[in-house]
Amino acid sequence: MNVIDIKDLTKDYGKSRGISDVNLQVEEGEIYGFIGPNGAGKSTTIKLLLNLIYPTSGGAQILSMDTVTQSAEIKKSIGYVPAEVRYYPNLTGEELMKTTLNFHNSKNYDAIPALCQKLDIDQKKKIGELSLGNKKKIAIACAIIHEPKLIILDEPTNGLDPLIQKRLFELLKEQNAKGATIFVSSHNLNEVEEHCTKVAFIKDGKILKIQDLSGDKTHIKIVTVSGDNLQKAMFQSIGANIISDDNNILKLSYKGDISNLINILSTDKITDLTIENLSLEDEFLTYYKGVDAE
């Protein structure tokens, strides 16, 4: 079952960038990453899913319900962490969490202290007194506390310290084990690679690629070579893709016969060399610099 099903979704702002003909399916039980640079269309896509803005064309379904006509029903079954958190400043974190539970017809108030302890939340402080990071922690708590079927998070780790970032993904894994589907936009590529089962790359409002992160990528190598007068053409002649060339440091991706690569390396005056398996960060850089990692 597709928990999220997006078909030809378009938001046209005229001169400003929106999204164009986005197609995306998130299956039940997935932890799905959604990555791209600032302005790529991540938040626009999420706002369309939540019916916070209306599409120009195309459409989407969440839990087999239309995101425009059945939005109120959808919101009963989802949790949401916005990129920018804005709540009533005079409410305390505890009051906001209780309000969230009441909205979802739950009286599970006993869950509040344990969740606040995990996220290091002072539940008695008013929202208006909190820093950006502490507001984000309350948003995360409110998105999780009612144990929704789908949790949508827009840049959830912004403003969080590394320890809380780790705990966030521990909480998401716990919810996922209980049956929740997770859809998370992020700039933290290491976290996406470590925790997500699938990822979609978006740029300029269009999906570049959807990739299964459970697959084997070890056949693609990332080679970083340092030396004087490195011959890029020689590497390109065996099918290597140049990722960057800066101050006598050449970075490339390669998936051919490793012996061909070694032969070329032996002909140049190399001062340093690293060969690694392709990471999500490397793939991100190749796509967003216009080079195909495949």
Image: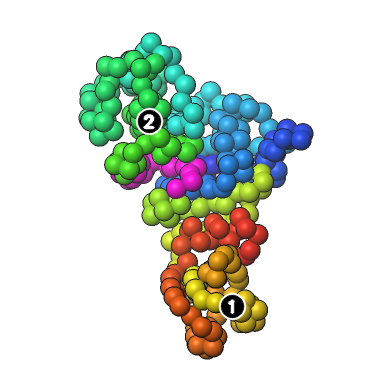
Which of the pair 248/34 is nearer the observer? 248
In the picture, the disc for residue 270 is none
- Crowding near the residue tagged with mark 2, few <14, some 14–19, many ≥20 C-alpha atoms within 10 Å: some
Q: What scheme was used to colour the molecule?
A: rainbow
- Position in image of residue 2 (x %, y %): 52, 45
Residue extending furthest toward the top: 90
- Position of residue 140 relative to residue 265, above or below, is above
- Position in image of residue 238 (x %, y %): 61, 82
- Crowding near the residue tagged with mark 1, few <14, some 14–19, many ≥20 C-alpha atoms within 10 Å: few
Q: Amino acid at mark 2?
A: Gly
Q: Nearer the viewer, mark 1 or mark 2?
A: 1
At horizontal 72% and vertical 35% (from top left) the residue drawn is 16
Decide if residue 149 is in sight here: no
- Position in image of residue 78 (x %, y %): 45, 31
Q: Earlier in the sequence, mark 1 or mark 2?
A: 2
Which region shows up in magenta?
169-188
Decide if residue 275 is in sight here: yes
At horizontal 49% and vertical 73% (from top left) the residue drawn is 226
Which image quarter holds the C terminus? bottom right
Is 184 contained in the magenta span? yes
- Position of residue 288 relative to residue 74, above or below, is below
At horizontal 63% and vertical 27% (from top left) the residue drawn is 53
16 vs 91, left or right, is right
At horizontal 38% and vertical 54% (from top left) the residue drawn is 194
Q: Amino acid at mark 1?
A: Asn
Q: Secondary structure at mark 1?
A: loop
Q: Quadrant of residue 165?
A: top left
Q: Quadrant of residue 99?
A: top left
| Distance in Å between CA atoms under marks 1 and 2 | 47 Å
The residue beneath circle 1 is 229
26 vs 120, left or right, is right
The residue beneath circle 2 is 133
